[in-house]
Image (cartoon, helix red, strand yellow):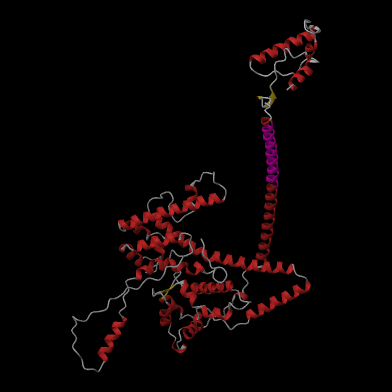
Amino acid sequence: MLPRTQPNVLTSEPASRRQSSQLRGSNGNKTEQMRSTIHNTMCWSRALHTGWLVLLVQLLCSEAVPISIDKIKVQEPEQKAEEPPASVDTGLHYDRYLREVIDFLEKDQHFREKLHNTDMEDIKQGKLAKELDFVSHHVRTKLDELKRQEVNRLRTLIKAKQDLEGGNDMAVDHQALLKQFEYLNHMNPHTFEVDDLDRLIKSATKDLENFDKERHEEFKKYEMMKEHDRKEHLKNLDEDERKKEEEHYEEMKKKHADHPKVNHPGSQNQLKEVWEEADGLDPEDFDPKTFFNLHDTNGDGYFDEQELEALFTKELEKIYDPTNEEDDMVEMEEERLRMREHVMNEVDSNKDRLVSLDEFLVATKKKEFLEPDSWETLEQNQAYTDEEMREFEEHLVQQEQDLNEKAVDLQKQRDELERQQEQLNAQKIELQQAVEHMERLKSQNVEPPPEVHVEGNAIPEMHAVDDQLHPEHEAQPQGHEPQAPQYTPQEHHEQQQQQQHHQDLAQQGLPQTHQNLPPGHQEAAQGQHNMP
């Protein structure tokens, strides 16, 4: 959404074209999207009358005998409205939501008229958003539906992120997490209000302002990583191979720098070259206004960032060739964007990220247009400083140390899991052996001694030992009564306590043990227990 008829203030998490296109992607199209998303939809009604005007002039100038024409029988061919240009992804992570909101707002006549007459600064300050109160009920209902869908999409993304981070059992506070999405009012997930449109405009504008800076940082990291990898490769070579590799590197640098002179972007010489080689016109007939109309490909009266970047193709072809080993296509896209930024800074006087015809014509009268300074290419301007390279390598070393520590921790966890698995396997084998032993006893019709659990310990059940304490009684002949054992008073007292204890156990249904029996009684009880 931009001033006048240009809807691109909302143009642009992430669509940079890497390796010959990654760094460009949405970056080159971001501003166009905001404007062309809003404005391009408004150009549908443009009719094509030029052909009829030419035909009328030819008829008036003809020397042929005039023939009367029955105007009633003449039917004009149907005029087909121009189709709007295909919408380009802005690169914003909420691109689809943004475009759908703009598309429906464009369907409201009142809002469309206000958009035509609203200044860029007024849009940024939220004055356009207030016009949402006057759009039709049908449009508002559709916007409500779009917002609910977007909120549900964000909640799904949050839940998926939680699952990936291992938080399946954790409660998700969606309200707290939705705060990070500033382009909508998460406190009201059901209706699309003025605040939502205002947030959407401001968030997209902020993202646009930061996008180029983030892209430059990405390219800087790319260049530093490329240099780091080259140095690491040299460390693994012997002296002769290292020398050859260094010589080859210097040769490629020299070959890349050997190219025709690059014209200053946006200068008269640069545009004349496009006029001659791309448009096939005589450079002596160069006319700025005609040039503007020729390269305003969507006919909206503005040069957007994509249309500007297309003007630099001829200059870039002087420096970069995708078939050459020494030419990096990622660097070519960075060079293209540097040229576009330079022209925007020089020509875009109202800083709306578009170049109007008036701004273009004013720029063609400046000294910088007629007598520009030489243009320094990327090889003449290193993307990073020595200090930045040093910090980057230190960061890589720290990252490697962190990864090594994590690897050690993971190995320890693995060893511990393996140890636990071995214990489980051993317990499993013991359990299987116990089951096999029980099966053998059953097959021999031998009843295994029952077990009871007293305080967690399995104790074989014992028969009462009242009449089993003296197995020698069985050897006495019949008719002889067994003689009572002789005890000291202390032993007699202990014996009475044990007998009372046995009686208590018998009454409670618990087994009697042969612990703490007097000497000789323990052996008898043990022998009785071992009898089949």
Q: Position of residue 179 (x, y in %)?
A: 48, 51
- Whether residue 433 is in magenta: the answer is yes
Q: Nearer the viewer, residue 372 or 382?
A: 382
Q: Nearer the viewer, residue 78 or 446?
A: 446
Position of residue 302 relative to residue 503, above or below, is below
Position of residue 52 relative to residue 521, above or below, is below
Q: Position of residue 78 (x, y in %)?
A: 27, 76
Can residue 442 be seen at all in this image of the molecule?
Answer: yes
- Whether residue 114 is in magenta: the answer is no
Q: Residue at x 69, y 49 (%)?
A: 409
Q: Nearer the viewer, residue 475 or 527?
A: 475
Magenta range = 415-440
Position of residue 446 relative to residue 153, above or below, is above
- Position of the N terminus, as image quadrant, is bottom left
Position of residue 146 relative to residue 27, above or below, is above
Task: Locate residue 21 relative to residue 83 in the image: left or right.
Answer: right
Q: Position of residue 406 (x, y in %)?
A: 67, 52
Can residue 4 be seen at all in this image of the molecule?
Answer: no
Q: Nearer the viewer, residue 481 or 432?
A: 481
Which secondary structure dominates the residues rendered in magenta? helix
Q: Residue at x 35, y 71 (%)?
A: 43
Q: Position of residue 484 (x, y in %)?
A: 78, 6
Quadrant position of residue 380? bottom right
- Position of the C terminus, as image quadrant, is top right
Task: Locate residue 21 relative to residue 497 in the image: left or right.
Answer: left
